[in-house]
Amino acid sequence: MRMIRIRKRNRDRNKLARRGPATVTARTAVTARTGAARWADGLSDVSIAGDPLAFPHLARTDLPDHPTTVAEYARLVREIAADRARWEPLVRYDALTRWYARLETGPGYEVWLLSWLPGQSSGFHDHGESSGVMTVVRGELIERSLTLPQPSAGGTPSGSGARTLRPGGHRVFSSGYLHEVVNGALEPAVSIHLYTPGLTEMNQYGATTVPEQHPEPQRPAQAETH
């Protein structure tokens, strides 16, 4: 029976190492003249693993930049809101609870799509350590906001208010921001929310811990900003 001889790939490299510095120097000179290292077995790192530059997807330079600032997050929300073909077919309504779906995730952020039937409310809540941006893309919503009590104020809220959110504007909020969002109109509404970092907790607050609030009176002849 003929025995199959297993070829050792590194035998020539090992021999080269045993021959000493003089041989290595001579081999280096040959490499410099030929422009490439040619091992006796014809193998090299490139021939074994392949040239990474031969695969364009491994060295792409046209990858999109991810948002990292509040202005960039707000711009991303506006872009998604303007792309109705992206989110409109996904919208669903649920008579028992608020419907939501994740639209996008990225390094340090996520984007959600929410729908609101008339009368549906989020209840007073915060977003833990997350800050974010929200915008209304269909219908209108009422936001009631409340700044958490400060010790220097004797435990009383340092600010509260209510505002109507309509398409075209946006709200920016920081971590610890306490608010309630409700659809007080007769038509369904849809909104887009970005959280950074991604939402991992949402603390609910009962009605007994939040003072009653009333919408601010409308100011005529003023542009609405969110």
Image (cartoon, rainbow, N blue to C red):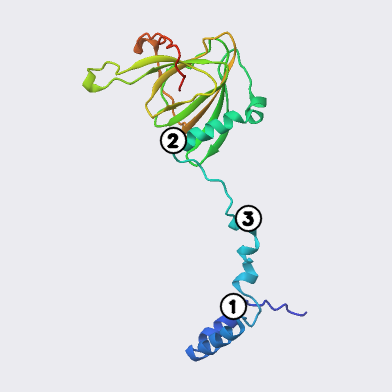
Q: Quadrant of the N terminus?
A: bottom right
Please tell me whether mark 3 sits on a helix, a strand or a loop: helix
Compared to 21, does 213 lie above or below? above
Q: Amino acid at mark 2?
A: Val
- Estimate the x, y position of residue 209 in percent, counting from the top left: 34, 13
Q: Which of the two discs, 3 and 1, labels the residue nearer the N terminus?
A: 1
Residue under label 3, please give it: 57
- Crowd tier of the residue under label 2, counting other residues whose Cα lies within 10 Å: few below 14, some 14–19, many 20 or above: some
Nearest to the eye among marks 3 and 1: give it.
3
Residue 39 on image: x %, y %:
62, 81
Q: On residue 206, which mark appears?
A: none
At a point 52% along the width and 84% down the height, the residue shown is 17
Q: Secondary structure at mark 2?
A: helix
Give residue 41's quadrant in the image: bottom right
The answer, for residue 222, to whether it is visible in the render is yes
Tell which of 132 and 125 is nearer to you. 132
Q: Which residue is mark 1?
A: 10
Q: Which residue is mark 2?
A: 70
The CA span between labels 3 and 1 is 31 Å
